[in-house]
Image (cartoon, coloured by chain):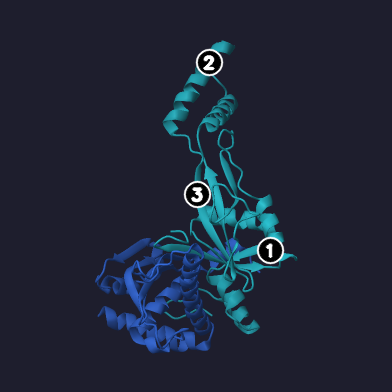
Amino acid sequence: MGLLSATMSLARYRVEGRIPDPFLETVRDRLKNNAIREIDNDPAEKSVGWTCFENPFQPDFDSANLVFGTHLVFSLRIDKKQIPAKVLRKHLNMAAAKRLKQTERNSLTKNEKQELRDEVARRLYVRIPATPNLYEVVWNYEEQLLWFFTTQKAANEELESIFAKSFKLSIIRMFPFTEAEMVCDLTDKQKDLLYKAGPTDFQGGAHA
Amino acid sequence: MLDVAVAYNRYKYLGNEFLTWLWFMMETDRSAFELPEAESTNLEIGNRIVLENHRQNRDETITIKGDGAGLEEGIVALKKGALVVEISLVVKAPEAEWRFQLKGESLNISSLKPPEKSPAEAADDMEQRVLEQVAHAERAADLVHQLYRQFIHRRLSEDWSKTDVPAMTRWIEQSAS
C-alpha cells in the first residue's frame, strides 16, 4: 500500500511552521540526526527512524535524492522484533527452574517473575533479527502538506512523534474537524457553528 | 483549538454525515458537485459501502460489497438510522478510470488504484514513477478536499436543516419504499 505499490493508502497532514535556511541542508541534517538505528544483535525490541526512499536499508542522507519535483520524499522505518510466544514460554520456564534451583526456593514472587521475563526477552531480542517496515513520506513544503503512505494508527502515531522531535514543527492530521477548521476557509461565524454542532438526526432534523 | 484526540472522537460524525450526503448527492443531484474537474470527471459509488447504526443501543455494521451489488440494503439501513462510515469511489474520467476508498471518521484515503497503464506507457525512471504516483495521490486528496469543503459549508449553513436534511430524509423514505 506504499507509494510505488499498485494501490496506495495515505493519511494527510498539515505542517505548521517553517524550516530555517539553508532549507535542504537543514532537512538533511535533521533526518540524519534521527535516522534509523540498526538493532540486529542488540537487546532493543524496536527502532524508529528516518531512512532514504531509494536506499532504505543502507541510508546515506548526504548523497540521497530527497527532492522529487516540488516534493521532499523520504521514508519512516520502524524495525520491530517479535519473539514467538511459545519460544518465550520455553526460555522463561528454563530460566525460572534455574533460578529456583540456585536460590533453593519453591516459587518466585510476582516482581521476580516480571524481572526474569524482561531478562529472558532481552537475551532473546539479541538473537532475533528485526522486521523492517517502511512507510513513505511525501512533503509538499510550499503548500505545508504532508502525506504519509499508511493509515495504520500505530505508524501514524510514530510519525507524529518523530516528526515533531526531528523538525521542531508540529504536524496536524487532517480529519473531519481539523479539515473543516483549518483548510476549508470557514468564517469566524461558521467556526462558532462548527464548535457548537451536534449530529444530524435524519429522522427528526438537525442540531445547530 | 481542542485537543486533537478529543476533536477526532467528538466530530467524527461529521465525516459519516459527509459520506452519507455524498451518496445522496450522487443519486439525486450530481451536477451540483463543485468538482475541480467538473466537466471531465464523473464520480460514482464503487464496489464497497459500509454503514453503521449506533442508535437506540444498536451496534450494527452493514457491509455491501462486490461489483454490481445492489444498494437496497444500505437504503434500508439508512432508514433505520445508520450512516455511511466508509465508501468506495470511482472516478470515470474520459482518459481512464481510477478508484479509492474513503473512511468517514478519518477522511483517510485507502486502496487508491491509479489508472492502469500499458507496459509501454509505464515509466522506467524512478523519479518519473514517483512523480506519477504523487500526482495520483494529489488528485485523490484534492477531490476529497473539494467535496468535503462543499459539504461543510452546506452543513454549517441554514440550508442544511431547512433544505438538505428534509431532502435527504425524503430520498431515504422514497428509495426504501
The answer to whether A16 is drawn above or below residue A168 in the figure is below
Q: What chain does badge 3 belong to?
A: A
List the residue tagged with mark 1: A24
* Quarter of the image with the N terminus of chain A in it: bottom left
List the residue tagged with mark 3: A133
- Marks 2 and 1 on same chain: yes
Q: Residues within 10 Å of mark 3 (few under 14, many from 20)?
A: some
Q: Residues within 10 Å of mark 1 (few under 14, many from 20)?
A: some
Residue A203 appears left or right of A130? left
Q: What chain does badge 1 belong to?
A: A
Of circles 1 and 3, the one toward us is 1
List the residue tagged with mark 2: A98
Of circles 2 and 1, the one toward us is 1
Residue B61: x %, y % from top left: 35, 62
Residue B147: x %, y % from top left: 47, 79
Image hue for chain B: blue
- Marks 1 and 3 on same chain: yes
Residue A120: x %, y % from top left: 54, 27
Sequence order check, earlier mark of 3 and 2:
2
Residue A203 visible, this orientation: no
Image hue for chain A: cyan
Q: What chain does badge 2 belong to?
A: A
The answer to whether B106 is drawn above or below residue B90 in the figure is above
| Badge 3 element | strand
Q: Residue at 48% x, 59% y: name it.
A: A151
Q: How many marks?
A: 3
The amino acid pointed to by label 2 is: Lys
Q: Residue at 59% x, 50% y: name it.
A: A59
The answer to whether A164 is drawn above or below residue B175 in the figure is above
Residue A110: x %, y % from top left: 56, 27
The amino acid pointed to by label 3 is: Asn
